[in-house]
Image (cartoon, helix red, strand yellow):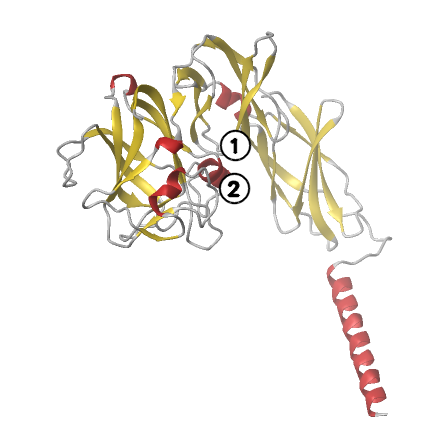
Amino acid sequence: MKNDRLCCLTLMLLVASLLSCSKSKDSVFPTDTNASAPDPVSNIAVENIPGGAKITYDLPQSENLRYVEAEFPIGDDDVREVKVSHYKNVLTVEGFPDASKYEGKIYAVGQDEQRSEPVTVSIEPQTPPVVNVFETVTMNETFGGVKVNFENDFEADLMLNVLMEDSTGEVVSAYKHYTQSQHGTFAARGFPAEQRRFGLYIRDRWNNRSDTIFTELTPLFEEELAPENFAEVALPTDSHEPHCCGDGIHSMWDGVWNESSNVFHTKATGLPQWFTIDLGVKVRLSRFKFYHRNNDSPNDGAYYSGDVKQFEVWGSNDPNSDGSWGSWTKLGDFESIKPSGQEPPTNEDIEYCCVNGEDFEIPDAENAPAVRYLRFKVNENWGGVTGWLYIAELRFWGSIQEVYN
């Protein structure tokens, strides 16, 4: 009997709760199908922007107003649609392919989805980002491929597709670069030092495309250094003893990256710190890739904590055994860049630095000395902590001058 009373009481409370929710819902979202449509919006003003327009308006006083909707046809089968809450008096329509004049309609929509009479609006979008960015693109030969530079002032979400002409004369995609960065530089590599026709076009998230640019370029010669030739050099004052997370300095050339555990992680002895690598060959370096540590933990991994930010690279063929710097030649000063500049890092940032590896070119590489030993001196990390550094992987390219057995 006691259990029966308890079950009955529970059922009554559940029913009361459901009725309460129903009343609450009805009070906020009336569903009277006989209700009249809201009055139209009024006092419309248009501000044309690149690829779209911002439209402001006065909301009607209709009690059952739910949202405002805009529809702008683009061609026969494409319509730009935007819905905004009845709490807002501005909407933005985007994704127009050119700076032409477009005519659309704006509706006030009630809780029962009844539309007001439409208000016709004309807009004239400014030149869209997909065109603006295309006009800033430059393409030049670089080591192993083509380097692309561009400006994306409005930080539009774009894809830059590098094309190449293959041996049969067919034009195919060679590399796709996705970005929302304001300034951009990237390279499509892996090509021999032979003249080749390269191209590029840009596409936005509405599938609008720019024109295509073509150019004839001859990539500069380079070859990748074999990691199996690398060796640790433990000079005095070097930071070479591991702290955690991997097999010491050897973790930087074991072919494993884009994870948190298999990395070179130094002890907390303060910055700057430096370490030395024997490449096993004498080489005129052209570039190298630095793969950041990937870690899902908050405030750790790429662009946090001990992740390397500012550093120097030095070369030598006969390092002083006491670890001093007199026998070393600086090859360059470098700084890691977060493409988005956002906090926290975006998926694009992680793809860039942890999956693909951040690319660094040796300044004036064709005139740089050929060296066997490299010394990395880290002056600053992304976390601003003074203790340590971590690196997942390093890979090197250049022109090999001499091989040592």
Q: Is residue 219 left or right of residue 369?
A: right
Residue located at (57% from left, 11% from top): 166
Q: Secondary structure at mark 2?
A: helix
Q: CA distance from mark 2 to mark 1?
A: 16 Å
387, above or below 47, in the image: below
| Residue found at the far bottom of this picture | 1
The residue that disc 2 covers is 347
Q: Secondary structure at mark 1?
A: loop
The residue that disc 1 covers is 156
Camera-side residue: 236 or 80?
236
Residue 127 in view (yes/no): no
Q: Quadrant of residue 378?
A: top left
Label 1: how many Cα within 10 Å (few below 14, some 14–19, many 20+): some
257, above or below 314, in the image: below
Q: Amino acid at mark 1?
A: Ala
Tell me where residue 190 appears, x and y as whole percent.
47, 21
Q: Quadrant of residue 2?
A: bottom right
